[in-house]
Amino acid sequence: HEGAIETDAVIVGAGPVGLFQVFELGLLEIKAHIIDSLAYPGGQCIELYPDKPIYDIPAVPVCTGKELTDNLMKQIEPFGATFHLGQEVTTVEGLDDGRFFVATSKGTTFLTKTIFIAGGVGSFQPRTLKVDGIEKYDGTQLHYRVRNPEQFAGKNLVVVGGGDSALDWALNFVNDGPNKAESVILVHRRDGFRAAPANVAKMKELCDNYEMQFIVGQVTDIVEDGGTLNAVKVTGGDGVTRVVPCDQVLVFFGLSPKLGPIAEWGLNIDRKQIVVDTEKFQTSTPGIFAVGDVNVYPGKKKLILSGFHEAALAAFGAAPYIFPEKRIHLQYTTTSPKLHKVLGVE
Ligand code: FAD
C-alpha cells in the first residue's frame, strides 16, 4: 500500500448527498477525500436534470439541479475536501488494523479509517454500441468519450448518436480549427434529435453545403482488415445496408448508471441497495456507511432531503472511529464559536 493517501474519511460519489457528507464531516473536523467516476460533481442532478427545477429542498422554494450543486460546492468550500474526479472506486478492502484500503480505476489509493458510500444509483458509464466484434476497438478506433480531440484531426469520422454530445462533437470536428477532421458523418437512428435546436440547424446547414453528412440508420456491422476497423455498416430506415468507410467511430448514446464494483465489497445488499441501520446509516461492515439513493432501510425514500439527514447521522456515527477518545456534542452552527472557526466565519 505504498504511496496510498492516508485519511480519516473517503466519500464514494460526489452527488448531492456525497457533497453534503463533506459538510457534515467538516463540522466534526473530519477531513474527507471525495471520488466520482464523472468528471464533475453533482451526480444525477447534473447528469440527468441540470436545468430542471427542484421544489422540495427545505427552505429553497425552487432551484435547478445545477444551482443545487453549485450551492453545495460553495457551502462545503471551507472544509477543503480533496476531489478525485473521473475515476471509479473499484476496490475496498478491510485491513487488520481496522482501516480500509481503497483504490480507483486511475490507480489512486487510500488508507482510510471510514468510508461513506454515496454512490446513488451507481456510477455513470457510457452506453455502448452493441455490434459484434466492435468492442476490441474500444479506445483505439472506437470511443465513447473524447479525451484528446487532437487525435481526431485529419481523420475520417463516424459520429453516432442524436443528443447534445453527438451534435457538439460532430460540429466541433467539422469546424475550422486545430481539430478539424478530414470528414464527418453523423449517424442517428431517426431524423429527430434531442439536442440544442441551434446545433441541429447548424448541422443541417453544413450537410446542405456538403461539409458533413447525416445518415439516418443504425450501425449493424463492421468491416475489418487485419485488426483494423475500415468501415461500419449502417442499415437505414429503408432497410438498405450501406458501407461507410471511416478511421474512427465516436459513439454518444448517453450515460447509464451501474452499481458496478460496489456490489463486490462484501456488504449486505438487498436488490442493488446497501442495507443500513437508521441510527448511524452504517452498513454490515463497521466503519463503512452508506447514504443517499444507494442505501435501503424500512421506509426509505429516495429524496435528496433524506440523504442530507442520513449524512448528518452518518458523520456522528463515524466520529468514534476517528476520535475514539473524544465525546462528540451536538452544536449549533448559529451559536457555536468552534463551528464558526471550522466554517471560517469568525
Ligand atoms: P447520485 O446523485 O446518484 O450521485 C451518485 C454519484 O456517485 C454519481 O455521480 C456516480 O457517478 C458516483 N458513483 C457511483 N458509484 C461510484 C464508484 N464506484 N466510484 C466513483 N463514483 C461512483 N430528488 C428530490 O429530492 N427532489 C426532486 O425534485 C428530484 N427530482 C428528480 C428528477 C429526476 C429527473 C431524477 C432522475 C431524480 C430526481 N430526484 C429528486 C432524485 C435525486 O436526484 C436523487 O435522490 C439524488 O441525486 C441522490 O443523490 P446521491 O448523492 O445519493 O446519488
Image: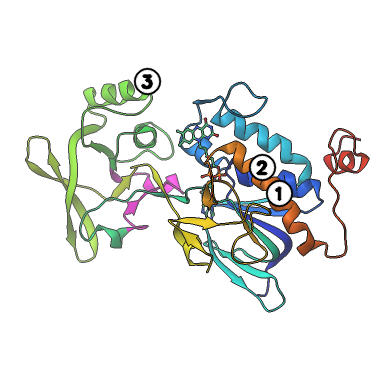
Q: CA distance from mark 3 to mark 1?
A: 47 Å
Q: Nearer the viewer, residue 283 or 240?
A: 283
Please tell me the numbered disc located at residue 313: 1
Amino acid residing under circle 2 = His
Give how far across and how far down residue 194 sits, in percent: 33, 29
From the viewer's perspective, tell me whether residue 34 is left or right of residue 37.
Answer: right
- Asked if disc 1 is less than 8 Å from ligand 1, the answer is no
Q: CA distance from mark 1 to mark 2?
A: 7 Å
Q: Nearer the viewer, residue 110 or 265?
A: 265
Asked whether the residues under the numbered discs 1 and 2 touch, taking CB atoms below 8 Å apart as contact, a structural biologist would say: yes
Query: Does the stretch in magenta take in 5?
Result: no
Quarter of image, res 290: bottom right
- Asked if disc 2 is less than 8 Å from ligand 1, the answer is no
Give how far across and how far down residue 264 sits, in percent: 48, 67
Vertical relation: 201 (above or below) 223: above
Q: Nearer the viewer, residue 299 or 340?
A: 299
Amino acid residing under circle 3 = Ala
From the viewer's perspective, tell me whether residue 166 is left or right of residue 214.
Answer: right
Which region shows up in magenta?
138-158
Which residue is pictured at 87% across the width and 34% down the height?
345
Q: Quadrant of the N terminus?
A: bottom right
Amino acid residing under circle 1 = Leu
